[in-house]
Image: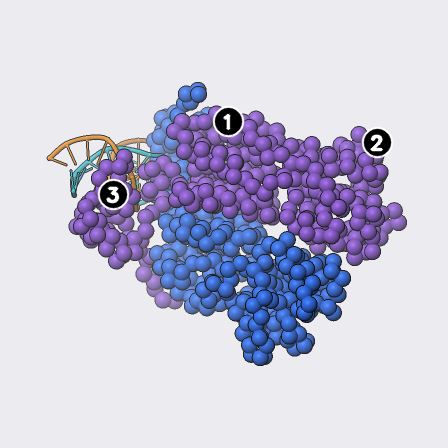
Chain colours: A purple, B blue, C orange, D cyan
DNA sequence: CTGAAAGCGCTTACAG
DNA sequence: CTGAAAGCGCTTACAG
């Protein structure tokens, strides 16, 4: 194997030497001077920029952020797989961040193992702030600690109280229960639930969908049949197959609640391909309100936010980042509602 | 507004003082000693760990990474919106990274503006390495420069030659042309194309799908009708509406090629809802091979990789990260193929 | 076995 | 107007 040169990354010292100035001057040219002091004169600037171009200098993040005590980076933590909503939020964060010269990194929480590794990004101050979407298994106490240490945080959560960070209330439990109530009110008694794998083992906040389903059935004296709860909501192929299977049973369910719109849409296909009318033969309700639900026939009844817009939440994160002193925690709303369309 | 305490982040100096040891000892306890030297004795360790717990110390990434000259973080750059493939790759990277105590950040490239901000993450060494998926508008010369400076890079690209980084060949052009050839061979002449918005203005590498479509039609002497090229592939609702519109025309197309499987699936539904048989009345081909294409009826003919697995590419990135000296660039394969199913 | 000290690359108050 | 110097928080060769 060829012996390769050790990779060389030039530093400001190299630039300074090359341009015959001090490293202070290099920094002034590259990053400007604090407090609007006069920048170095044009001639000096040119010499420095020439040296920068010649050696291909790039500022080093580690050095800069250690000195400045901020990273100019923010994060979006969301549960994998991504969704149109997480994509949209990432995009809106990026737009706002780009205006200020900040970068955005996405932290998809896949599996349970990833939690620790991703939390490190927040704990070790890799970023200055973050938006946490629901169902990220982060310890509430830890969130408060992070906020107290100066991390700017906007957290989507229905239970947590703000405490040096902001909380966005969605009212997901109420909305999910409304969906099941809607089915019960229409006379359904055999209602299947397409859930996340392992959802019944999750701790309370994350299993809000399954709990809503069970709670409403119980309140109406309807038994929760274990064989009507299927862990297929995270896989469209699995959801499709599962619903085909349900419809082949001797006593098929008359309605399906799905923890994801994606799986609900496949439930609609499965019914149609099986020759079962929707909602006549099988009523279907999703959770999440993705744009795709508007497209299918019949359009999908679901639960979610009506506005495909996070600008208020993003703006709040930047307020927090810009604030000189720590801001008190605030409660914001981005309510989920039952959105009745054609499929149920 | 209440005056708030300035956020306090304890440092190793605070721990050292509290535990009555030096900062060196604190570091030895927290991070171990290089070269397997003996760690501090249990009694010291306990004192340090107690102090750590008492003040809630967390290592500071900026300090550590400046000293160690690495960030223990890798990135995945991909074009937004996310897809099952980018989700899968992120997940596989996370699994492999977690084993080594590394973190993974995702960099979704949304819009054209985001390019600069995200590239900064690579240029300024926020991360030690990255996987770049196709259609990220990154300058090839810049990639070589980054690699030369020691960044570990695995790049999905059909044109670029490896040069201190590895290249994964997918052969997307060949595969896309095969799909159009497949339609032409079946006798289709009016073939619509659902493309990415702005695709006709993109520079060569990114517009491979549209170019493949045009090229094959031209080779067969079929005129490319501008009104059959629709920029709707990134929006499922738009794609659905566009195909409904196509089918209402006096002379509707008999086939559709879509730049995304997602839009292709909506094309199938649009046809079904319009009462047009697929593939009899409208043949539909997607690009991308997402799992959902297997679920719909008729199943989706598409183009893409057969294996839903990036372990070879991920393994290569880690080889590169682990290598003492810079590794020469290598060419890997993850070929795209025409996958003929029922819809065309 | 443990500590004092140097230094990673940068920024910035300060002196000249 | 510009440079010498301190220091951000950490790690690590080195001396004791």
Q: Is residue B41 above or below residue A264?
A: above
Query: Taking the image as drawn, is residue B330 in sight?
Result: no
User: Is disc 3 placed on a helix, strand or loop?
Assistant: helix
Residue A48 on image: x %, y %: 22, 51
What residue sits right under mark 3 in the picture?
A28
Residue D13 versus residue B177: which sits nearer the camera? B177
- Whether residue B153 appears in this view of the structure is yes
Query: Where does the C terminus of chain A fall, quadrant-wise?
Result: top right
Residue lying farthest right?
A: A250
Q: Which residue is mark 2?
A: A221
Q: Residue at x 62, y 55 (%)?
A: B238
Structural distance between the alpha carbons of marks 2 and 3: 73 Å
User: Residue visible at 63% across and 59% down?
Assistant: B242
Residue A256's image quarter? top right
* Dot 2 or dot 3, earlier in sequence: 3
Q: Which residue is mark 1?
A: A329
| Protein chain holding label 3 | A
Q: Secondary structure at mark 2?
A: loop
* Between discs 2 and 1, the one toward the N terminus: 2
* Residue A208 percent across, percent down from the top left: 68, 35
A7 relative to A227, above or below: below
Disc 2 to disc 1, C-alpha distance:
41 Å
Q: Residues within 10 Å of mark 2 (few under 14, many from 20)?
A: few
């Amino acid at each position: 194997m060829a012996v390769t040169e050790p990779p060389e990354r030039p530093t400001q010292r190299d630039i300074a030497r090359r341009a015959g100035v001090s490293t202070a001057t290099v920094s002034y040219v590259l990053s400007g001077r604090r407090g609007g002091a006069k920048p170095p004169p044009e001639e000096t600037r040119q010499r420095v920029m020439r040296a920068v171009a010649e050696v291909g200098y790039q500022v080093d993040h580690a050095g800069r952020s250690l000195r400045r005590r901020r990273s100019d980076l923010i994060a979006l933590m969301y549960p994998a797989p991504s969704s149109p909503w997480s994509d949209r939020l990432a995009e809106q964060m990026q737009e706002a961040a780009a205006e200020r010269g900040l970068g955005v990194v996405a932290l998809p929480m896949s599996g349970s193992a990833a939690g620790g590794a991703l939390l490190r990004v927040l704990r070790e101050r890799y970023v200055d702030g973050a938006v946490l979407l629901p169902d990220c298994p982060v310890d509430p106490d830890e969130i408060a600690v992070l906020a107290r240490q100066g991390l700017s945080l906007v957290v989507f959560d229905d239970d947590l109280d703000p405490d040096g960070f902001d909380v966005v209330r969605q009212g997901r439990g109420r909305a999910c229960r409304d969906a099941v109530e809607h089915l019960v009110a229409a006379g359904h008694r055999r209602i299947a639930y397409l859930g996340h794998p392992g959802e019944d083992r999750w701790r309370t906040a994350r299993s809000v969908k399954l709990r809503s389903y069970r709670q409403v059935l119980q309140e109406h004296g309807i038994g929760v049949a274990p064989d009507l709860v299927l862990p297929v909501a995270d896989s469209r192929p699995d959801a499709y197959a599962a619903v085909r299977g349900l419809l082949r049973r001797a006593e098929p369910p008359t309605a399906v609640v799905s923890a994801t719109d994606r799986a609900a849409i496949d439930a609609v296909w499965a019914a149609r391909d099986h020759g079962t009318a929707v909602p006549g033969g099988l009523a279907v309700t999703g959770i999440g309100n993705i744009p795709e639900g508007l497209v299918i026939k019949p359009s999908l009844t679901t639960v979610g936010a009506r506005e495909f817009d996070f600008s208020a939440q993003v703006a709040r994160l930047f307020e927090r980042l810009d604030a000189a002193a720590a801001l008190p925690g605030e409660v914001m709303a981005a309510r989920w509602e039952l959105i009745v369309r054609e499929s149920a």
